[in-house]
Amino acid sequence: MNATEQSVVDAATAINMEASLKAQRDSYTNEGIVTAATRIDRIDRAVDVLVKYSEAISEAMNADFGCRPREVNLMTDVTGSIECLKHCKKHLKTWMKQEKRPTMFPLNLLGGRSTVEYQPKGVVGVLAPWNFPLGMVFEPLAGVLAAGNRAMIKPSEFTPATSALIADMVAEAFDPTELTVFTGGPDVGQAFSSLPFDHMIFTGATSIARHIMAAAARNLVPVTLELGGKSPVVISRSADIIEAVQRIMVGKMLNAGQVCIAPDYVFVPEELMDEVVEQATLVVKEMYPSLLNNDQYTAMVNDRHYQRITSNLNDANERSIKTVTINPANEDFTDNPTQKIPPTLIINPDDDALCMQDEIFGPLLPIKSYKNFEETINYINDKPRPLAAYYFGKDKIEEKRFLTGTTSGGVSINDVMFHMLQKDLPFGGVGPSGMGAYHGIEGFKTFSHAKGVYRQPKRIPVAKLAGFMPPYGPASEKNIKQKVKR
């Protein structure tokens, strides 16, 4: 396809997206009240289609990655989505109820009543990433549907088989005025993010998020951003080292590190460095006796990311930084069609090293030593705020210092990533790692408009009694004197 033909396709797609947005918004407006029954029905249909196509979903993701374990596909993307949808279904009737709020004196004495009522925003745009290409569509979609919205979805072009399947699943289960999917590359994504949605959620890289926000700003579209960052781990001297390292490496090796909340670097007491390296090596060998032909070890999603991780390793070698490659079967990775990378520990890299600059998003793990605990707090605070942070130890004073002395999107204590699996906890970032949150009631509120409603009593001239009604006089002065004071 030449440039002219591509331009025609992109223009047609943009026109279709605009028409889809109008159709969804018109349908939402004409529907009026979005009842709990309607919301539950949409959630049920989403669950049904996920159950029906669960194995096909896994096969599509495996095809996109070249190698991605069936168990990972089902336990993360599929079950994670179903759990979010079911959780929202269980609680949405309670979340939908209006909230009573105090009414200011003297209006409360005169019968005035104040409430907050949660109203759907309308049409939400969902921009999903490639690392969990189905989960990052349907997990936020749970809150979108629970809040009574319609949605347009743009899945990642890096996982074309999965994106095509999502489009087919949505088309089978939903009318396009409820949910619809647009696939395609960066040009489609750019046009998508420029639409005047009522809300937009983007999951992906911080660098792309800047463009998403700029596009959304032109239409003043509120945006929820779930990004990433260099999520730190601190192992305390009070920690059970064997238990801590096992849990860290299980989390780090999930999806070969291609996880936004994966441990990105680890702080260990200087005298425990050798023990931590030894334990990490043993844990990986136990999980993966071999790597190249092991269908339980995930490959890099594409050549671009394979080369990016390779650049991190080359940089460490050029800087003479010690690395420990964990290759249990001593396999030759020069013949590597699936582009797998063996787990590699990078020992005490300097801050200028490539692996310490950006989120790694791969099976590399820098390990830095420290003398006193406060060093770790200062180091973390000198860096951009991460999406997640992790502390291992039994020292409650240190734990409190870690929780109150650092700022991150979320925290797990004595494990990694499990805070994200709690569907009643808000999940999101802070600063460069994101803004806004979803999951649980926070997700429902993210995709709802909290409308403040004041009900004025009948037959009582409130404005006159309160001195707001001209001509101003004694009632006005009394009101002023009551409030202009310490």
Image: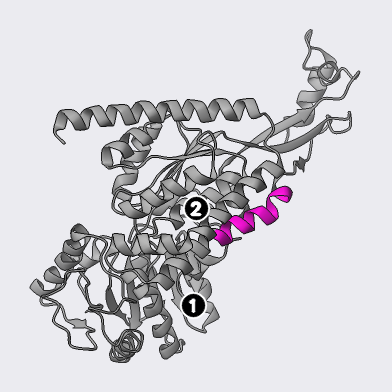
> Residue 352 at what x, y percent from top left?
18, 65
Residue 264 visible in the shown view: no
> Does 284 sit above or below residue 431?
below
Label 1: element kind: helix
Q: Residues within 10 Å of mark 1 (few under 14, many from 20)?
A: some
Residue 18, picture quadrant: top left
Q: Quadrant of the N terminus?
A: top left
Residue 398 got which mark?
1
Q: Is residue 373 left or right of residue 102?
A: left
Magenta stretch containing residue 83, yes or no? yes
Residue 291 got which mark?
none
> Residue 117 at what x, y percent from top left?
70, 37
Give the amino acid type for the residue marked by disc 2 in the picture: Phe
Q: CA distance from mark 1 to mark 2?
A: 37 Å
> Residue 398 at what x, y percent from top left?
49, 77
Residue 138 got which mark?
2
User: Which sits earlier in the primary sequence, circle 1 or circle 2?
Assistant: 2
Q: Quadrant of the C terminus?
A: top right
Label 2: element kind: helix
Q: Residue at x 71, y 39 (%)?
A: 35
- Identify which residue, 430 or 377, lies in the foreground: 430
Q: Which residues are magenta?
A: 82-94
Q: Nearer the viewer, mark 1 or mark 2?
A: 2
